[in-house]
Image (cartoon, helix red, strand yellow):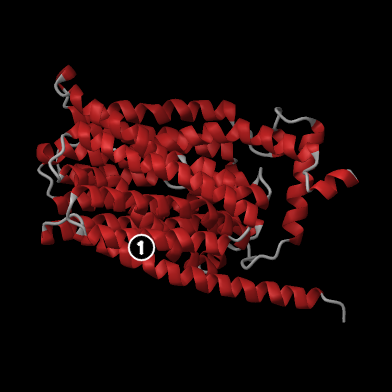
Amino acid sequence: MSPEQENAGQKPEVETTTIRRVAMTLIPFLMVCYLVSFVDRINVGFAAFQMNKALGLTASMFGLGGGLFFLTYFIFEVPSNLAMQRFGGRRWLARIMISWGIVATGTAFVVGPWSFYASRLLLGAAEAGFFPGVLLYLTYWFPAEYRARMVSLFYVAVPISGFVGSPVSAALLEMNGIGGLQGWQWLFIVEGLAPVILGILTLVALPDRPKDARFLSGEQRSWLTGQLLAEQQTQVRAVRDSRAWAVMFNPQVLLLALVYAGGSAASNGLSIWQPQILKSFGLTNMQAGLINSVPFALASVAMVLWARYSDRKGKRISFTVLPLGLSVLALTGCVLSKDFWPVVLCLTLTLVGTFSIKAPFWALATETLSPGAAAAGLAMINALGNLGGFIGTYLIGMLRDATGSYLLALSPILILEAIGCVVVLGIGQHQKRLAETARAAAAPV
């Protein structure tokens, strides 16, 4: 970098061109893959409009089936991420997508509660490892100062999936009777084939590491490899042990998982139940689909802007706890509200807060874990966190049957997110002490 660039605070040209090239090559494709992944996970919320009656599912049965996805997702998460470290991102991510697409398509042919439960268990096992696998994959390509915005660009596929998938899923329900199949069956078939196609394309589109990237010049590959290596050697990490079991049960990893559980319970629970919450106010399928898409659209914009600001400031703790607090307040409004538009506003603010947490939280997690601990640590955080998705989704169904109110049924998610606010502040204090100890050890005697 020239003295003029240093004085102006500008990045060297090789850095800006390399990061831009990597981002534009990898992120859009990964976004599409994750969008399809999440559509296949949450489309059951729209299928329920027809499927629950066809299969004889009560709200509790549907909530159990919706939540069982996260049980096998939890069991297979860490093994999947360790397998990705061994076989490489390209082949392993392709395997995940092809297998979950096959299972998602097969859900069209369930015939009752037990086959529905089985399909959700299989879908969780098939998809396990995709999200933490991509997070791990991004650490191979982006230095720490870029990760929050890159995670947000990737993760924005989740709220976009609600925005795009809601009207599409509602429209697919209108295929009722075509080919002798019901609309909910066509929904699973059409939306299940997409990941199979994307999985095949992954084998061509994704290189494993920067050294394999033909889209980068030799100078760009050298700069990126050197930058990532230097960062690994100098960053202070709270979790450095590379043994899988030691990483998985490290207190910092478990606390991060507890924080993530609240956000996961809110995002996954609302993604599955929100269409039915809206329809309970007397909306048609298409009206529920269109209105359901609006909160996800606003959440998409908010999470990208929040992630960019988080990278600029570098304050991961405050940028995690503030949207988490917003989500808690908005969920409280949901529980207390009875009228339609206040409920829509509170659901929107809940999703804005919940999705804005994601990028700074995962940037915090990757900065907490050393490279050797990242595979097991990220998978464990996501796996345990997604148990919140299982618990939240199931409890919403149980409480809906017990109270007759979808909104009161959101109370467990509210409590879990409130606990997360307290925990993340405690993590911040621990990191502050670690940084002070490192500075004291480095100071000249």
Residue 368 % position (x, y): 61, 62
The residue drawn where x is 65% and y is 45% is 140
Q: Nearer the viewer, residue 201 or 350?
A: 350
Question: What number of labels is visible?
Answer: 1
The residue furthest right is: 3
The residue drawn where x is 38% and y is 51% is 73
Residue 366, compared with residue 173, is above or below; it is below
The residue drawn where x is 49% and y is 68% is 424
The residue furthest top is: 179
Residue 47 % position (x, y): 22, 36
Q: In the figure, is residue 352 to the left or right of 20? A: left
Question: Is residue 179 shown to the viewer in this render?
Answer: yes
The three-letter code of the residue at mark 1 reads Val
The residue drawn where x is 35% and y is 66% is 416
Residue 337 % position (x, y): 21, 58
Name the image quarter holding residue 326.
bottom left
Name the image quarter holding residue 4.
top right
The residue furthest bottom is: 445
Badge 1 crowding class, 10 Å Cα cut-off, few under 14, some 14 to 19, many 20 or more, is: many
Rendered-image quadrant of the N terminus: top right
Disc 1 is placed on an element classified as helix
Residue 205 % position (x, y): 58, 28
Q: Nearer the viewer, residue 287 or 166?
A: 287
Q: In the figure, is residue 381 to the left or right of 291? A: right
Rendered-image quadrant of the C terminus: bottom right
Residue 332, compared with residue 303, is above or below; it is below
Q: In the figure, is residue 214 to the left or right of 374? A: right
- Disc 1 marks which residue? 328
Question: Is residue 391 shown to the viewer in this render?
Answer: no
